[in-house]
């Protein structure tokens, strides 16, 4: 059955746009989620621009394919040129699947290199049959060149970001009865409430104040205990114990506690 030129034009454009629709199945959902969270270079275009640009490029591809197709499929060079065109169109779809669907910028970069070569070959084959058809593909190869550079940059940015490590669900019991888990890139236990540098500094300030204020009384108590044959045991007072002791001494100790509330 002979197909008129208008039907060929419509078919060529529809086939090209269908390739874009297939790719968009993987692209649209990832653009606003996964892709939006990626570290990207400063020259990365806004996300909304991808849809209009690709729609236009697929339209131009369809016209280019029509200009070659209308020369007649009975010609061997036309069949070869359109065959190469379909190969690059398939590679175009697979790039979207690999980059956005599989979320693998590294593999997508290797694929887009092959895609670029296929587009370049298509331009060469088209040029021998229809120069306007070849020129219509130049915006396409320029955009893919830019997309390839952007793909490479995104891939390199991701390699520089430390990978998150899944920490085990262990817990450490703190002196105050609370518990802390593992976190951070090295999966270290989070500091207990009394182990942070700020709390330790406050503990030491209150303890020094208490010792300074009650040093004489404390010495007498120690001497009495030793005379009676008692033993001394070095213990680490809790934060609450220190605060309670501080409240009983000088006003400056009380001011230290107020800073903790």
Image: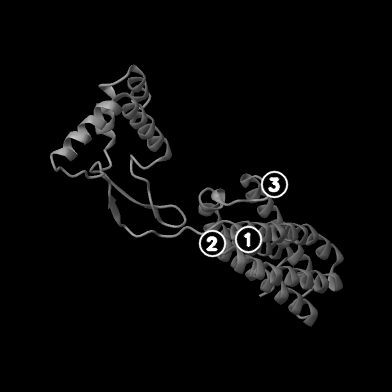
Tell whether 153 sits left or right of 224.
Answer: right
Tell me the element at label 1: helix
Residue 82 position in % (x across, y down): 73, 74
Residue 103 position in % (x across, y down): 54, 61
Q: Residue 128 or 87: which is nearer the viewer?
A: 87
Tell whether 51 sits left or right of 149.
Answer: left
Residue corresponding to mark 3: 42
Q: Nearer the viewer, mark 2 or mark 3?
A: 3
Q: CA distance from mark 2 to mark 1?
A: 10 Å
Residue 3 visible in the snapshot: no
Residue 103 is labelled as: 2
Report the residue at 21% width, 35% height from top.
223
Tell me the element at label 2: loop
Residue 260 position in % (x across, y down): 35, 27
Tell me the element at label 3: loop
Answer with the quarter of the image where residue 228 lies. top left
Residue 67 position in % (x across, y down): 78, 65
Report the residue at 28% width, 28% height from top.
243
Crowding around mark 2 (Cα neighbors within 10 Å: few <14, some 14 to 19, many 20+) is some
Residue 81's place in the image compared with 228, above or below, is: below
Mark 2 vs mark 3: which is more N-terminal? 3
Residue corresponding to mark 1: 155
Residue 76's place in the image compared with 241, above or below, is: below
Tell me, yes or no, whether the two marked residues, 3 and 1, touch with CB atoms within 8 Å: no
Mark 2 vs mark 1: which is more N-terminal? 2
Tell me, yes or no, whether the two marked residues, 2 and 1, touch with CB atoms within 8 Å: no
């Amino acid at each position: 059955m002979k197909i008129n030129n208008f039907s060929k034009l419509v078919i060529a454009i529809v086939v090209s746009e269908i390739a874009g629709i297939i790719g968009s199945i993987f692209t649209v959902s990832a653009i606003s989620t996964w892709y939006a969270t990626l570290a990207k270079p400063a020259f990365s275009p806004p996300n909304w621009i991808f849809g209009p640009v690709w729609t236009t490029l697929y339209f131009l591809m369809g016209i280019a394919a029509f200009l070659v197709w209308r020369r007649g499929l009975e010609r061997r060079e036309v069949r070869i040129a359109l065959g190469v065109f379909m190969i690059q169109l398939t590679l175009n779809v697979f790039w979207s699947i690999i980059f956005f669907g599989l979320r693998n910028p590294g593999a997508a970069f290797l694929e887009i290199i092959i895609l670029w070569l296929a587009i370049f070959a298509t331009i060469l084959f088209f040029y021998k049959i229809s120069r306007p058809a070849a020129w219509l593909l130049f915006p396409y190869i320029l955009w893919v060149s830019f997309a390839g550079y952007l793909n490479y940059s995104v891939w390199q940015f991701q390699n520089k970001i430390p990978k998150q490590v899944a920490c085990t669900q262990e817990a450490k019991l703190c002196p105050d009865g609370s518990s802390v888990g593992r976190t951070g890139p090295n999966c270290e236990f989070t500091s207990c409430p009394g182990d942070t540098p700020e709390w330790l500094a406050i503990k030491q300030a209150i303890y020094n104040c208490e010792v300074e204020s009650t040093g004489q009384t404390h010495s007498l108590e120690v001497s009495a205990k030793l005379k009676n044959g008692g033993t001394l045991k070095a213990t680490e007072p809790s934060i609450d114990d220190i605060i309670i002791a501080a409240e009983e001494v000088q006003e400056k100790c009380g001011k230290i506690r107020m800073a903790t509330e």
